[in-house]
Amino acid sequence: MKTKTFLSIKVLTLFSFIFLLNSCTDLDEVFLDEIPGNTVSDPAGSLAAAYDRLGDGTFTDHGAIFAMQEYTTDEAILPTRGSDWGDGGKWRDMHEFTWSSSNSIIVGNWDLLTNGITRCITAIQSAEQSSVPEKKLFAAEAKALLAFYTYTTLDLYGQAPYKDPMDPKATLQILKADTQIDKLITDVEALLPDLADIGTQRTHHGRFTKQAGYAFLATMYLNRAVFKDRYNPASSFNFNEPAVSGTGTDMDRVIYYTSLLIDSGKYSLESDFFKNFARNNENGKELIFAITQKIDYIRNGSNSFAYVSMERNQRASAANRGTNAACITPEFYASWAGNHDDPRFEQHYQYADGTWFMNDGTDVSVPATDIVPKSANLPWFHFNRGIQAGLQYGPILLPSGSLEMIGNRIKVSPLFMEKSTGTRMNFTPTLTFADPNKSVFAQNEINQGARVFKYEFDPEGGNGNSNVDIPLFRLGGIYAMRAEAYFRKGSTGLAMDDLNKLRTSRTRESLFANAPGKALTSLDAEQLYKELGFELYWELQRRPESIRFGKFDLAGTAKAASQPFRRTFPIPQTVIDQKVFKQNQGYN
């Protein structure tokens, strides 16, 4: 039985302001959270607090790490839409590259990540000082999580704090990306023997297993060249530098670790691509390391990646709606030209009675037989998945607070914008701003932008809750990493084999005879970059991809060409003012 308790967490001055954490759970449960009545000295509870920081916004909310990894790229943008999403310009800053050290997204994510570092240090200390049978396992997981939070902080900010958990007199260290990346790699490699194989010792994809370690090491090796030479003006990174350990180059190690996962037999590609991002995907065949979300548990999950693109008048039930915020850029939409029949681009929903939601004006109604779980008999309307463009259709919310019906079916109608009621909901792939350099729409222009419905909207529990686990590492991304490593080694044929495995393993819905994706017949760097986007869009991967491929600095929609120093974000001014950190290059 789960009850709420409070966990007091030691904090490092400057880096963590969260002192109390509501928590609950039992290690025998599917999720690893805090156990009732724990204290900081309890290793299970301390480790649970370290895991908890992955969720609770950090890697699950569009305004957290997502904003820095996606809105800064050629893939995503969150413009000001009439009276909405101004917020002091913080969202526009991300895409227009006008951020400063006081931008609240930059400040907030620093606090979240360094709080994660703090929690891991506490968890390591707690595990090492304990005598529990799982001592070695808990310590290894805590150290792996510490490496993950530290790596992410170094990726975004170029610097990260660290304090030796086993030395009470230890001084604060300032880690730097270019020198620390090698240490992170060797540290995680040394942890592998003590991490559990997934499925053993009560582990699952929500815990840092040996397999998560392989995926993490492949990621670090793939980006090592960027960490070591971040400001290279020509983006000519040395991806084939001799590896930190083992034999061969960085790309050889990427191939080695990704192959361990691909050949392990523990994972397989989903033929239905969108199952990876669906409600109750806890048994997902591709998930290697993911943030477990479950309504009725401590955080109740987050629907952020789903509803951030939906318009406010798009409703999966009468109890929720979208936000009309983020969309993809015209550049990213154009990258799909000639590939709209790819199973990863769009998927129509079929109801149990055979009705397809076509979203093209031909729909009259859909069955109301799907009911939102744990609701007062609310009908559940299923929108299509993937990238949605053009005129939109769906249910209308009546003044009575219920969806409009035809008999016992949900009526499908043309949809209009909530805050511009005469404006048809038309998700145009183009974005037309009055000032091309400023992503600002007038109120009657707020319909613009093709939207991403990759993650299933989970209407249970209201707008903010979700049972959808959020992948951090999954098999599709592992194939993509190996393909890139092969390509950077000059093995174009092997790279194309992996990309074609991704393409042809995915199949369309039965409406299109379950047709598989089409295989590539040629491959160059430009096509490889597109392929990474096809597989991994909306998964917090685009900024590192765009830096590796020399795309990050380029001009684009509402973005002027930028200088290499923007590849790293500034240290928050509040931290600089404490005179412990020095500001990053270019942010004086």
Image (cartoon, helix red, strand yellow):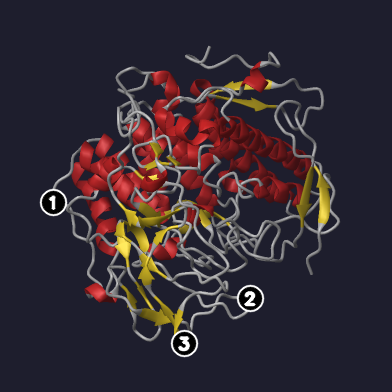
- Residue 532, image x, y percentages: 32, 45
For label 2, the crowd category at 10 Å Cα-Cα, with few meaning under 14, some 14 to 19 and many 20 or more, is: few
The disc placed on residue 408 is 3
The residue tagged with tag 3: helix, strand or loop? Answer: loop
Identify the amino acid type marked 2: Lys
Label 3 CA crowd tier, 10 Å (few <14, some 14–19, many 20+): few
Residue flagged by tag 3: what amino acid is it?
Answer: Asn
In the rendered view, tell whether residue 154 sits above or below residue 493. above
Mark 1 vs mark 3, CA separation in Å: 49 Å
Which residue has dot 1 on it?
Answer: 521
Residue 182, compared with residue 485, is above or below; it is above
Q: Quadrant of residue 148?
A: top right
When the figure is inspected, residue 551 is found, relative to residue 405, above or below; the finding is above
Q: Earlier in the sequence, mark 1 or mark 3?
A: 3
Q: Nearer the viewer, residue 458 or 176?
A: 458
> Quick check: 130 left or right of 228?
right
Residue highlighted by disc 2: 374
Res 241 quadrant in image = top left
Q: Does residue 321 appear anywhere in the picture?
A: yes
Instruction: Tell me the CA gap for discs 2 and 3.
Output: 20 Å
